[in-house]
């Protein structure tokens, strides 16, 4: 019962869209109505409001990190096993991708996945973030950076976590990230992918 409650709570937390909330707070249009239509930090940045994008990034990453940290450190007192922690990590990520509060139409999960990785192991999360930053610095393309980090994340997971349930969850997150970026992959192949910071609002 406690395990099920933890997983459900993580999913509901993941369903909170900080991109939508931040846009409302800063008086911006709903991020689902411009740019890529994705309520994530990169698309919110296209509004030209860096503060809103920062809040989105921190919020979406924070919910992933918080879910895993609470399950890891508070869980043992409630009988939550490593397998349940892994399920919580997957649940918060799926909540972001398919949020019940937004009719199951969510973001692509890059920031939330980063938060989950940081919750599992800070060095693993920082390594994935460094991968994103390195590719972004060279290409100036957010989706390409996310794809590079997603492809390498399972490798980092095996190195930092070893073979096990947590590494398997990281692999699932990576596969879902690549799947959510399928339209970006098509745009990249066509040479039409937008670059970081390009505005979509007048």
Image (cartoon, rainbow, N blue to C red):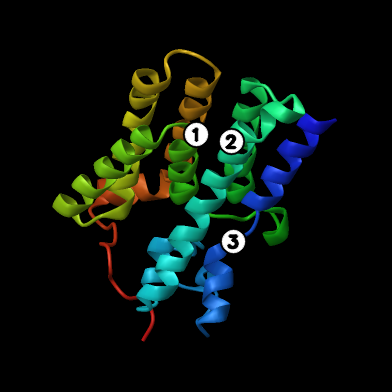
Please determine whether, in this image, residue 141 is positioned above or below residue 88. below
User: Which residue is at a point 50% across and 34% down the rendered structure image?
Assistant: 173
Asked whether, in this view, residue 110 is left or right of residue 76, the answer is left
Task: Report x, y in % for residue 78.
Answer: 76, 29
Please determine whether, in this image, residue 140 is positioned above or below residue 1. below
Q: Which mark is residue 89?
A: 2
Q: Which mark is residue 17?
A: 3
Task: Give the label, 3 or 2, closer to the camera.
Answer: 2
- Which circle's residue, 2 or 1, is located before the other in the chain? 2
**Disc 1: which residue:** 173
Seen from the viewer's position, the closer of residues 29 and 157 is 157
Please determine whether, in this image, residue 176 is positioned above or below residue 139. above
- Judging from the image, what secondary structure is the residue with disc 1 in? helix
User: Which residue is at a point 25% across and 55% down the rendered structure image?
Assistant: 141
Please determine whether, in this image, residue 78 is positioned above or below residue 118. above
Q: Does the rendering let one see residue 55?
A: yes
Contact flag, marks 2 and 1 (Cβ < 8 Å): yes
Cα distance, mark 2 to mark 1? 9 Å
User: Which residue is at a point 56% across and 51% down the rendered structure image?
Assistant: 63
Label 3 crowd (10 A; few <14 / some 14-19 / many >=20) = many
Contact flag, marks 1 and 3 (Cβ < 8 Å): no
């Amino acid at each position: 019962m406690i395990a099920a409650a933890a997983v459900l709570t993580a999913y509901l937390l993941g369903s909170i869209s900080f991109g939508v909330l931040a846009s409302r707070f800063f008086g911006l249009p709903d991020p689902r109505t411009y740019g890529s239509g994705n309520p994530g930090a990169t698309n919110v940045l296209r509004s030209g409001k860096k503060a809103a994008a920062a809040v989105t990034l921190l919020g979406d990453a924070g919910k992933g990190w918080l879910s895993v940290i609470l399950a890891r450190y508070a869980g043992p007192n409630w009988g939550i096993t490593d397998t349940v922690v892994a399920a919580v990590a997957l649940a918060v990520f799926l909540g972001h991708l398919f949020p019940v509060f937004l009719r199951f139409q969510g973001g692509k999960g890059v920031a939330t996945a980063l938060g989950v990785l940081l919750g599992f192991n800070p060095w693993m999360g920082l390594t994935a973030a460094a991968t994103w930053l390195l590719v972004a610095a060279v290409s100036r393309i957010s989706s390409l950076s996310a794809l590079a980090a997603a492809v390498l994340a399972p490798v980092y997971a095996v190195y930092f976590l070893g073979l096990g349930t947590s590494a398997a969850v990281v692999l699932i997150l990576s596969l879902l990230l690549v799947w959510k970026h399928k339209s970006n992959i098509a745009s990249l192949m066509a040479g039409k992918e937008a670059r970081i910071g390009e505005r979509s609002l007048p």
